[in-house]
Image: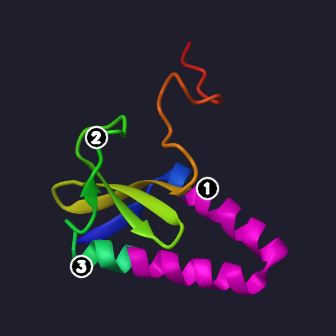
């Protein structure tokens, strides 16, 4: 099953790689490798993640890779990675995220 990455997840990954590169290029390379491995695991085993009822979208699963969490949704013919975050970060929740301007 094909795996795609949402714009927000891709933006987070780009920012995280840049952050790591500026401090530790080896860690950045390892992070990129871990992302690729996590993506392959989800592609091969779509049910590998745990259902996460704390996420704002029903049906999302979370896969842990290293210190990071990857939230994804299995759709009819594709798996979409909707968010990636460090394990110490809270999931984004509409209305609680400081960048959410829905009010």
Give how far across and how far down residue 29 sits, in percent: 65, 84
Residue range corresponding to the magenta coloring: 10-38
Q: Pointer 2: residues within 10 angstroms few (<14), some, or many (20+)?
A: few
Left or right of 4: which side holds 73?
left
Residue nearest the observer in this picture, 64 or 80: 64
Q: Which mark is residue 1?
A: none
Q: Pointer 1: residues within 10 angstroms few (<14), some, or many (20+)?
A: some
Q: Residue furthest front?
A: 88
- SS at badge 1: helix
Left or right of 30: which side holds 73?
left
What residue is shown with label 1? 11
Q: Main secondary structure of the magenta part?
A: helix
Q: Nearer the viewer, mark 2 or mark 3?
A: 2
> Is residue 14 found inside the magenta-colored segment of the image?
yes
Look at the picture and state if 14 lies above or below 100.
Answer: below
Q: Which mark is residue 53?
A: 2
Q: CA distance from mark 2 to mark 3?
A: 23 Å
What residue is shown with label 3? 44
Give how far across and how far down residue 99 sits, in percent: 64, 30
**Who's the residue at 19% across and 61% down the image?**
77
Left or right of 47: which side holds 52?
right
- SS at badge 3: helix
Label 3 near label 2: C-beta < 8 Å?
A: no
């Amino acid at each position: 099953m094909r795996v795609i990455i949402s714009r927000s997840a891709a933006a987070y990954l780009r920012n995280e790689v840049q952050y790591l590169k500026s401090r530790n290029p080896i860690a950045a390379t390892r992070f990129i490798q871990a992302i690729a491995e996590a993506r392959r695991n989800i592609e091969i085993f779509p049910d590998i993640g745990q259902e996460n009822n704390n996420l704002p979208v029903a049906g999302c699963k979370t896969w842990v890779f290293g210190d990071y969490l990857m939230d994804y949704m299995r759709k009819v013919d594709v798996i979409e990675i909707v968010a990636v975050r460090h394990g110490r970060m809270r999931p984004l929740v509409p209305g609680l995220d400081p960048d959410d301007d829905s009010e």
